[in-house]
Image (tube, coloured by chain):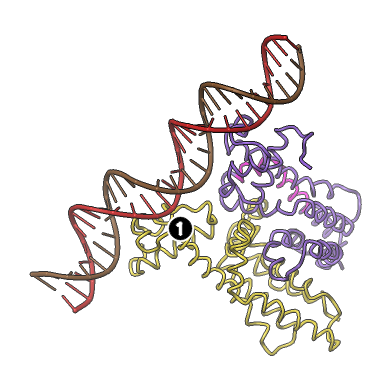
Chain colours: A yellow, B purple, C brown, D red
Amino acid sequence: MEEIDKNTEQKILDAARSIFTNQGFAAARMDEIATEAGINRALLHYYFRSKQKLFDVVLEENLNHFYQSFIRILASDVDLETKIRNLVIAELDMLVANPNLPLFIIAETSRNPEMMIEKLNHIPIKQFFLQFMQVVNTEIEKGNIKPINPVHILMHIMSLCLFPFVGRPVFKHITGASQEQFEKLIEERKIIISESVIQLFKK
Amino acid sequence: MEEIDKNTEQKILDAARSIFTNQGFAAARMDEIATEAGINRALLHYYFRSKQKLFDVVLEENLNHFYQSFIRILASDVDLETKIRNLVIAELDMLVANPNLPLFIIAETSRNPEMMIEKLNHIPIKQFFLQFMQVVNTEIEKGNIKPINPVHILMHIMSLCLFPFVGRPVFKHITGASQEQFEKLIEERKIIISESVIQLFKK
DNA sequence: ATATTGTTTAACATTTTTGTTAAACTTTAA
DNA sequence: TTAAAGTTTAACAAAAATGTTAAACAATAT
């Protein structure tokens, strides 16, 4: 049952990703990471000199994973409505596979803004934002859609896609939903979310 | 400029709320809280014996503050559409005044589910959920609105209202918005959010 | 076979943070 | 004015977490 064929470095990174992503930097314990990786603290430091260095690797992985899920879709050669539908589906599929990613990024940014902003500058997320603004504004100028501040569209997409995962620990408690029911709900929401967003700008 | 007329216990609680709400339990430092309150560590422990005890008080305050913002509105004697508009406005006003509240509750629940679930049971939040389900289902039975799983409506409201605040640290970086611009955006969204939610069920 | 690399054990050093205490001093209330 | 409560200082104790090391052993590659 152990992941015997994986090399140790990978086992450490997997364990570190899991623990850091769930607990955040401050609450994570090196001992816990070592145990989860099936090794001891001495070996952990043999591979990664310090907690901060290990965290940096995990953080970089997570940031890349996060932004790559939606960066490509805008470039596709379809109308805005289809772009939105594709974006929502891709985003929700990524989130079902990585449900803790957004809370991790948001919480660490809140706890340590300077460091996170520095790291965020290493990925072209602002570029994505500008491209999105431009795509929408062009459609407005062409008269294809209703005039609206594109930021509202982006805020709608982000809110409706990300929040269910960010708020999942609380949501599941309030509603009493199982993991299965939660995922079924997300599947249903692919359509509902797209329609809500499209209604913001459809003539 | 100091808050000289406030008694020390209140100054400690204010500082603790600020630091715990921004940093979370694990990253918060007693020293930082003492300094923020304008006192020293010895006096901090003179008032609150331990970090955990101080945190518990802050947590209880925060939970009450959070749920009281939306618990009353459902009981009002107006149609569902008006209830939603009022709920969204009240919620966003509360959040502008307490922007870090939702992230605090969500992050702490994620980091320490057992403890938080125990605390959440002290406030009638599940009761609110059940009441909401019932209100919507009654409207559906009466034929006043389109049939829809009420959970989707609640998820829409929570996502659209809470996410901008939860994701604010990241959002402000991506868009480069100032605090002023952010609040102006939220003001605009009062209408946009209500419309999006109402469109889910309006015939 | 042997050298290298990976791994464990166990002890220990260091750092960080929390919690405690005694003594002196200040403010407030009786 | 005096006693009590509030506050600071400074030192220290205790706990928790990170980081280091040496010695022994295992696995693997040359």
Q: Is residue B119 visible?
A: yes
Q: Main secondary structure of the magenta part?
A: helix
Q: Residue furthest right?
A: B78
State the residue at coordinates (77%, 49%): B131
Q: Can you give x and y, in whole percent of width and height, for residue B146 in the image?
A: 82, 66
Q: Is residue B133 above or below residue A94?
A: above
* Residue nearest the viewer, comparing A158 with B126: A158
Instruction: Please tell me whether mark 1 sits on a helix, a strand or a loop.
Output: helix
Residue at mark 1: A51
- Residue D15, image x, y percentages: 45, 37
- How many marks the image carries: the answer is 1
Residue B151, visible in the rendered structure: no
Q: Chain of mark 1?
A: A
Residue B203 falls left or right of residue D24: right
Is B126 a magenta residue?
yes
Q: In the rendered image, which quarter contains the N terminus of chain A?
A: bottom left
- Residue range in magenta is B116-132
Residue type at the position of mark 1: Lys
**Image quarter for residue C1?**
bottom left
Q: Which residue appears at 86% of the width and 80% of the height?
A: A146
Tell me the quarter of the picture where residue A125 sits: bottom right
Image quadrant assignment for residue B199 = bottom right
- Residue B2: percent from the left, percent from the top? 76, 40
User: Compared to B48, does C7 lie above or below?
Assistant: below
**The C terminus of chain A lies in quadrant:** bottom right
Q: Is residue A177 left or right of residue A199?
A: left
Residue B106 in the figure: left or right of residue A55: right
